[in-house]
Amino acid sequence: MEQRTARLTLLIDPRKKAQFERLCAEEDVTPSQKVRQFIREYIEQKTGEEWQKSSS
């Protein structure tokens, strides 16, 4: 599991936040888990490497 030592704060439209939270609940994941997934996938897409390989 990833070590969680940094905080990311962002501003989002309240309606988008509510919709995002609802969709996450449907997938039985927290919004934080989903955002971490998005970030991992973005890094892998941009670097062409799996996250664990590029983080060492």
Image (tube, grey):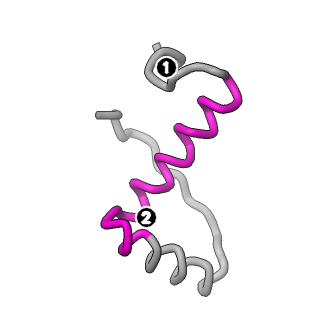
Q: Position of residue 23 (x, y in %)?
A: 46, 74
Which residue is depicted at the point 37% across and 74% down? 26
Give the camera-side residue of 53 and 7. Answer: 53
- Mark 1: few, some, or many residues within 10 Å (few <14, many ≥20)? few
In the image, residue 11 sits, relative to residue 2, either above or below, namely below
Task: Using the numbered discs, state the Cα–Cα distance from disc 1 to disc 2 in whole angstroms.
Answer: 23 Å
What amino acid is labelled 2 in the image? Answer: Pro
Q: Which residue is under mark 2? A: 31
Outermost residue, right direction? 46
Residue 4 falls left or right of residue 42: left
Q: Is 16 positioned to the left or the right of 21 in the image?
A: right
Q: Position of residue 28 (x, y in %)?
A: 31, 66
Considering the numbered disc 1 on the image, is that residue within a helix, a strand or a loop?
Answer: loop
Q: Is residue 49 magenta?
A: no
Q: In this rendering, is residue 25 above or below 14?
A: above
Image quadrant in which you'd find residue 12: bottom right
Which region is colored magenta?
Answer: 24-47
Query: In the image, is 10 to the left or to the right of 51?
Result: right
Dot 2: within a 10 Å radius of its alpha carbon, few (fewer than 14), some, or many (20 or more) residues? some
**Which of these two is toward me, 6 or 2?**
2
Does the segment drawn in magenta span residue 34?
Answer: yes
Give SS at disc 2: helix
Q: How many marks?
A: 2
Q: Please provide percent x and percent y for residue 31.
A: 43, 64
Task: Quickly name the residue at label 1.
Answer: 55
Q: In which quadrant is the N terminus drawn? A: top left
